[in-house]
Amino acid sequence: MIEHIVMWRLKNAADAPRFKALLDSCRDLVPGMLRFDVGIRREGLEANVDVVLVSRFADAAALDAYQHHPHHKAVGAELGAMRQDRHVLDFDVQDTTR
């Protein structure tokens, strides 16, 4: 399994709810997407970014299908105009259910 974590700092932090809504529209786009959680900065909790995506894919092929999906590409273009910084980490996860 592949964990796909993306964090964004926005040009305008007030855009975080709209940014989240756009990301949420990418949920369940492809087979093999096992987890898709979007969080936004909350007052009173420590944060260096405004929005985070934590997602999990069955394998690298499922992640690749997600990244190349036309809807994901369109959303990514819209999000790109709203972001100041983007950080990504993809890593292998051991399946603890086996």
Image (cartoon, grey):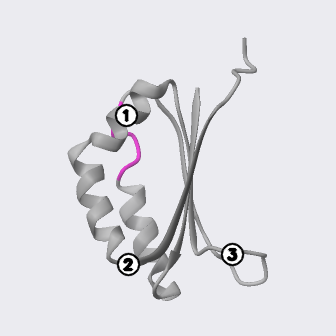
Of callouts 2 and 1, which one flags the residue occurring earlier in the amino acid sequence? 1
- Outermost residue to the top: 98
At x 38%, y 27%, the residue is 31
Q: CA distance from mark 1 to mark 3?
A: 28 Å
Q: x, y percentage for residue 9?
A: 54, 75
User: Within 10 Å of the Cα at label 2, are there few (<14), some (14-19), or many (20+) other Cα atoms?
Assistant: some
For badge 3, the amino acid type reads: Asn
The image shows residue 31, relative to residue 43, as above or below, that is above
Q: Which residue is mark 2?
A: 82
Q: Quadrant of residue 43?
A: bottom right
Q: Which residue is mark 1?
A: 64
Tell me the magenta residue range: 26-30
Q: Which residue is mark 3?
A: 48
Of callouts 3 and 2, which one flags the residue occurring earlier in the amino acid sequence? 3
For badge 2, the amino acid type reads: Met
Q: x, y percentage for residue 3?
A: 59, 38
The image shows residue 50, relative to residue 12, as above or below, that is above
